[in-house]
Amino acid sequence: CKALPLGEKPRRAVIAVMGHVDHGKTTLLDTLRKTNVAAGEAGGITQHIGAFVVKLSGGGELTFLDTPGHAAFSAMRQRGASVTDVAVLVVSADDGVMPQTREAAAHIQAANCKFVVAITKCDREGADPARVRRDLINMGLELEEAGGS
């Protein structure tokens, strides 16, 4: 981290939540903000980038971007990856890696963005988190548990 000029406040970190449609991105964020935005989306599918701020107990703040997962919103996901400090790649354990998962991962890699993977819907029938991890590794994502950093 570089030192800020005297008197300048640090900006809050920006975290983009990305992945395939209906993998639980908005629901994950609803849990953080204690809302139910997902219920109000057309067909349960996010149609726009949403942003909100979470206040931390230590006084800081984080900005979260909820990016749409539908194929029609590729440019929004690309912009989300390019302006973020950290990305959360959300992958459903029952669906696994899907086209927009691959695309979001490519945007994250192209932006040289730090990321974490959230595997959702592990309680569903047919869920296979190990398959998701294997597929992500096969895509070239270095997962920490497989020796990545």
Image: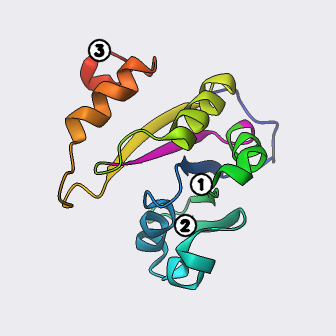
Amino acid type, callout 2: Val
At mark 2, the secondary structure is strand
> In terms of sequence position, does the residue under pointer 1 or pointer 3 come before the other?
1
| Residue 44 higher or lower than 106, as above or below | below
Read off the residue under disc 2.
54
Magenta highlight range: 82-92
Amino acid type, callout 3: Gly
Residue 44 position within the rendered picture, expressed as x and y whole percent measured from the top left: 53, 75
Q: Please name the colour scheme applied to the rendered image.
A: rainbow
Q: Is residue 42 left or right of residue 90?
A: right
* Residue 69 marker: 1
| Residue 106 higher or lower than 51, as above or below | above
Report if residue 56 lies within the magenta region: no
Report if residue 85 lies within the magenta region: yes
Around disc 2, counting alpha carbons within 10 Å, would you say few (fewer than 14), some (14 to 19), or many (20 or more)?
A: few
At mark 3, the secondary structure is loop
Read off the residue under disc 3.
147
* Nearer-the-camera pick, 104 or 31: 104
| Residue 56 higher or lower than 107, as above or below | below
Residue 51 position within the rendered picture, expressed as x and y whole percent measured from the top left: 67, 65
> In terms of sequence position, does the residue under pointer 3 or pointer 2 come before the other?
2
Q: Residue at x 47, y 73 (%)?
A: 30
Q: Residue at x 61, y 32 (%)?
A: 108
Residue 43 appearing in the image: yes
Amino acid type, callout 1: Gly
Q: Are marks 3 and 2 in contact (CB under 8 Å)?
A: no
Quarter holding the N terminus is top right
At mark 1, the secondary structure is loop
- Whole-number angstrom distance, CA of label 3 to CA of label 2: 31 Å
Name the main secondary structure of what is drawn in magenta: strand
Residue 57 position within the rendered picture, expressed as x and y whole percent measured from the top left: 44, 66
